[in-house]
Image: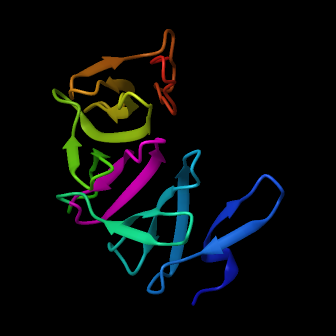
Amino acid sequence: SVDQENKGFLRAPDGTVTSFDHPDSKVTAAYGINSAGIATGYYSVDEGNHPGFVRQPDGTLTIFHAAGDDSGTFPNAITNKGVVVGSYYDLYSTPHGFLRHANGNIATFDVKGDAFGTNAMDVNANNVSTGHWGDADGTVHGFVRDAKGKIKKFDAPAAVSGTFPQGVSDAGT
């Protein structure tokens, strides 16, 4: 096992901290948790091998890779229905978005057009996700992806260094 600082952890409202890791991991990182205590994140086995996981409150880990994952699957958020959103990296270290349904089916997606890399950051109860993508000039823009997979691009007014959406409410804000 690795030392404490390389483990994932969950902190309960009473202050109790539960750390965990995959037995083969060098680093475990939890990034999202839902109201049932189901967490998601990734762990690192070795260079370029970073599987995603869903962790149940009893400690059971379900491991997954997005199709096309050559450099890692990195979940960022999980809904109360168990839908996970994040990014995976291909052989060229280009990020692509994914949405993993509670049944384990994974849909991958990219912003089309002049997009270079899609980073999915959050998902709401209606399976609407948000994140950011970069264009050929290096400018970062935001996107919203609806439950049917339609993507709308957007920029914050007067954004100087880019648009980096991090969350989406159940109302779509």
Q: Is residue 149 above or below residue 173?
A: below
Across and down, in percent, residue 59 comes to 54, 72
Q: Residue at x 50, y 26 (%)?
A: 161
Q: Is residue 7 found left or right of 69 in the rendered image?
A: right
Q: How many marks?
A: 0
Q: Residue at x 44, y 71 (%)?
A: 61
Q: Is residue 105 visible?
A: yes
Closer to us: 173 or 5:
173
- Quadrant location of residue 114? top left
Across and down, in percent, residue 21 comes to 54, 77
Across and down, in percent, residue 67 comes to 18, 58
Q: Residue at x 44, y 40 (%)?
A: 121
Closer to us: 101 or 97:
101
What colouring does the structure picture have?
A: rainbow
User: Residue at the right extreme?
Assistant: 14
Q: Quadrant of the N terminus?
A: bottom right
User: Residue at the bottom extreme?
Assistant: 1
Q: Residue at x 29, y 65 (%)?
A: 71
| Boundaries of the magenta span | 69-90
Q: Is residue 8 above or below residue 121?
A: below
Q: Is residue 22 found left or right of 86 in the rendered image?
A: right
Q: Is residue 51 visible?
A: no
Confirm whether the magenta stretch covers residue 86: yes
Confirm whether the magenta stretch covers residue 82: yes
Q: Is residue 106 above or below residue 44?
A: above
Across and down, in percent, residue 83 comes to 37, 44
